[in-house]
Amino acid sequence: MGGGPRAAAGRRLMAIVRHALPLDLAAVEVIERASFSDPWSLQSFRHSLSRTFVRINVAEEDGMVAGYSVLWMAGEECELANLAVDPARRGSGFGTLLLDAAMLEAHAEGSLVMFLEVRASNEVAKGMYARRGFHEVGRRKAYYRNPDEDALVLRRDLG
């Protein structure tokens, strides 16, 4: 999957990635609201957690949720539907850790390709995805709201 997650200078990332539990969702929602201008609701996360084709993972450090990912499984394809890191912990490698874990889990479950959407202006996320082998395969005009912005559709083979 490439190199390991980057950690801030002088700090070693000490986290685990695990499947989310219902008790994690309040922390996930706080991170979601701090990260996106059009956030998912707590009810959306609760509903997603109950779906058999959805995988929600959290990165945990010192007993606290530092970030999360949401993966939708669809046979040999999957979509990284959501990924966010607590603003206080960004730049410490949690995003890459969650992305790598999602790719490994998806591949282990039989997915051969992963897709995702990213805001066209989100240079940090686009850089992380590019470092992990994702490339642009499409563009969705005015996909995002608040503000309106195009989404880039990215793809990476997993097999």
Image (cartoon, rainbow, N blue to C red):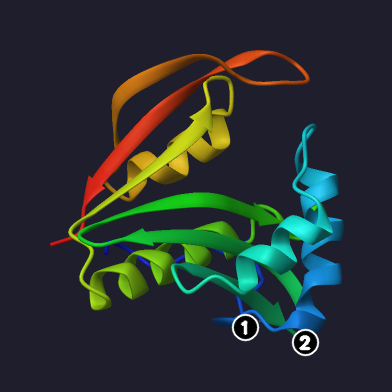
Q: Amino acid at mark 1?
A: Met
Cα distance in 3D space between marks 2 and 1: 8 Å
- Image: 50 above or below 139: below
Residue 58 location in percent, x, y? Answer: 63, 74
Q: Secondary structure at mark 1?
A: loop
Residue 86 visible in rendering: no
Report the residue marked by disc 1: 14
Are the two marked residues, 2 and 1, in contact with CB atoms closer than 8 angstroms? yes
Residue 133 visible in rendering: yes
What residue is at 23 percent from the left and 63 percent from the top? 111
What residue is at 44 percent from the left and 68 percent from the top? 53
Front residue of 14/9: it is 14
Quadrant where the N terminus lies?
Answer: bottom left
On screen, residue 116 versus residue 113, left or right, reads: right
- Image: 79 above or below 135: below
Q: Secondary structure at mark 2?
A: loop
Front residue of 21/119: it is 21
What residue is at 42 percent from the left and 71 percent from the top? 101
What residue is at 52 percent from the left and 20 percent from the top? 120
Residue 70 location in percent, x, y? Answer: 55, 60
Residue 102 location in percent, x, y? Answer: 42, 66
Q: Amino acid at mark 2?
A: Asp
Task: Answer few, some or many: residues within 10 Å of disc 1's Cα (few below 14, many 20 plus, some between 14 and 19).
Answer: few
Residue 108 location in percent, x, y? Answer: 25, 78
On screen, residue 92 versus residue 63, left or right, reads: left
- Image: 120 above or below 25: above
Front residue of 106/3: it is 106
Disc marking residue 62: 2
- Image: 47 above or below 109: above
Who comes first in sequence, dot 2 or dot 1?
1
On screen, residue 159 versus residue 66, left or right, reads: left
